[in-house]
Image (spheres, rainbow, N blue to C red):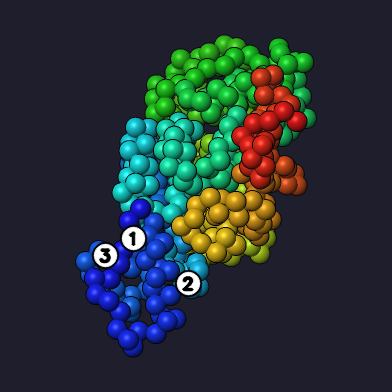
């Protein structure tokens, strides 16, 4: 890390307090701008800023979902800047389009960390994108804030996970399915990458006492819209109807619900429980295709609370009254405020290990409710199940209180009995309870 210094000695009129202030700015280096460059005198009238990265897909098959997460992240940053910034610094954002391509995610992460020298990165969507950048963050001992519900089975020191884990989303939804649709068969359908395969393994573990309930399991390449063979298989395996547990992602969901309607597969006979479809996707797919089906998240726009009403109002005032908010957007928005609180507790934005340590224990009155960063870098979160209504919103029909996160899933034999604790170096990523 280089230290920027003024090219001329300070004048006698340059008082000690101002010297210490500028010296403090110049020695921090990482992630700061407006603080002078080698060979140039510092402009003392410039408000210093700190740089953060936003890394998501603004093009390609995942753009349908990820663009709005960028908007929510930027809104939180703009709100913080308007209220005075963090540690009196304004936050400067560098937004990178990873183009729905995993090698591009890695390339852009490397750029943000090494070239742009941001102090933190907010982003990624799929588990494939997160795993593609993980090594960059761990090698550089940097920090990623990841806003998506995901499969768990990892606990990185260099990631704060603000989305739900399977024990907070998948497992409660299976309990609800069994009580709401008793004895109904289940077909597991997902995109072909790590998240769907892992959660389906967890579902099979949870249903091991009733293995005959699962009538099929199939995967579709990410972005593939040729889904006719899968539809035929579902109808063959469950001719009298049944629950479709859906972890498809991106454009494939549009093809699924269109073909289901064409084949007369109604929500009453073939209810679909989705874990990757939220408010934005409902309107992109078509409310007429989605009405009556279900989704499982920690957050829905329809939550009736003061914090959520403020969040929705602020977003729609900024981006348009027709815009929608969803769980990943809320988790991304929340992540920025948790980072701000951690920076303020640490007293620094550039000492990333200090910020990471300070993040543990942070609480925030989020739109989804009060959340807490646990010692395993995951949040305590509720589980909510919503049913799509004619207006495209979800009616919340079931919800829990905050559920403690379990990164190492207890339904999987290989990780049963393990936990994660980054507040204790002797425990760390994975230890036996």
Q: Residue at x 57, y 43 (%)?
A: 161
- 323 up-or-down from 390: above or below: below
Task: Look at the numbered disc 1 and give the secondary structure of its residue.
Answer: loop
**Residue nearer the viewer, 106 or 395:** 106
Q: Nearer the viewer, mark 1 or mark 3?
A: 1
Task: Look at the numbered disc 2 and give the secondary structure of its residue.
Answer: loop
User: In the visual, does 10 lie left or right of 146?
Assistant: left
Q: Residue at x 50, y 52 (%)?
A: 352
What label does residue 3 carry, if any?
A: 1
- 287 up-or-down from 14: above or below: above
Could you classify mark 1 by the number of other residues whose Cα lies within 10 Å: few (under 14), some (14-19), or many (20 or more)?
some
What separation in Å lies between label 2 and label 1 (alpha carbons)? 21 Å
Q: Residue at x 44, y 34 (%)?
A: 135
Quarter of the figure that contains the C terminus:
top right
What separation in Å lies between label 1 and label 3 (alpha carbons)? 9 Å
What separation in Å lies between label 3 and label 2 (alpha carbons)? 21 Å
What label does residue 37 carry, if any?
A: 3
Location of residue 255 in the rendering, given as x and y in whole percent from the top left corner: 43, 29
Task: Look at the numbered disc 3 and give the secondary structure of its residue.
Answer: loop
Mark 2 vs 1: CB contact within 8 A? no
Q: Is residue 29 visible?
A: yes
Q: Which residue is mark 2?
A: 88
Of marks 2 and 1, which one's residue comes earlier in the chain? 1
Q: Residue at x 63, y 62 (%)?
A: 307
Could you classify mark 2 by the number of other residues whose Cα lies within 10 Å: few (under 14), some (14-19), or many (20 or more)?
few
């Amino acid at each position: 890390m280089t230290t920027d210094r003024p090219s001329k000695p300070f004048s006698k009129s340059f008082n000690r307090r101002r010297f210490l202030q500028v010296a403090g700015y110049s020695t921090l280096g990482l992630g700061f701008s407006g603080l002078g460059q080698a060979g140039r005198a510092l402009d003392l009238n410039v408000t210093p800023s700190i740089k953060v990265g936003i890394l998501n897909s603004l093009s390609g098959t995942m753009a349908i979902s990820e663009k709005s997460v960028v908007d929510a992240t930027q809104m939180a940053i703009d709100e913080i800047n308007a209220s005075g910034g963090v540690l009196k610094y304004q936050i400067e954002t560098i937004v990178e389009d990873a183009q729905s391509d995993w090698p591009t995610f890695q390339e852009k992460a490397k750029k943000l960390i090494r070239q742009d020298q941001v102090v933190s990165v907010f982003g990624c969507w799929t588990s494939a994108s997160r795993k593609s950048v993980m090594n960059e963050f761990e090698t550089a001992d940097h920090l990623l804030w990841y806003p998506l519900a995901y499969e768990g089975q990892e606990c990185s020191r260099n990631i704060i996970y603000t989305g739900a884990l399977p024990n907070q989303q998948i497992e409660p939804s299976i309990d609800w399915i069994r009580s709401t649709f008793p004895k109904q068969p289940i077909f597991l359908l997902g995109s072909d990458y790590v998240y769907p395969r892992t959660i389906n393994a967890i579902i099979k573990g949870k249903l091991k006492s009733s293995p005959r309930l699962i009538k099929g399991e199939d995967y579709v390449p990410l972005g593939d819209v040729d889904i006719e063979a899968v539809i035929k298989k579902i109808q063959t395996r469950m001719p009298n109807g049944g629950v479709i547990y859906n972890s498809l992602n991106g454009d494939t969901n549009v093809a699924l619900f269109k073909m289901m309607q064409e084949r007369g597969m109604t929500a009453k006979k073939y209810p679909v429980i989705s874990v990757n479809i939220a408010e934005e996707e409902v309107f992109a797919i078509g409310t007429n295709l989605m009405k009556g089906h279900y989704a499982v998240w920690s957050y829905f726009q329809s939550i009736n609370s003061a914090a959520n009403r403020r969040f929705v109002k602020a977003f729609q005032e900024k981006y348009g009254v027709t815009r929608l908010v969803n769980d990943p957007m809320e988790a991304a928005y929340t992540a920025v405020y948790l980072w701000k609180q951690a920076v303020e507790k640490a007293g620094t934005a550039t000492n990333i290990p200090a910020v990471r340590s300070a993040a543990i224990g942070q609480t925030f009155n989020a739109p989804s409710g009060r959340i807490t960063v646990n010692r395993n870098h995951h949040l305590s979160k509720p589980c909510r199940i919503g049913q799509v209504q004619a207006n495209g919103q979800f009616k919340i029909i079931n919800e829990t209180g905050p559920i403690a996160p379990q990164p190492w899933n207890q339904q999987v034999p290989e990780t049963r009995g393990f936990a994660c604790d980054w507040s204790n170096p002797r425990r760390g990523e994975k230890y036996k309870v």
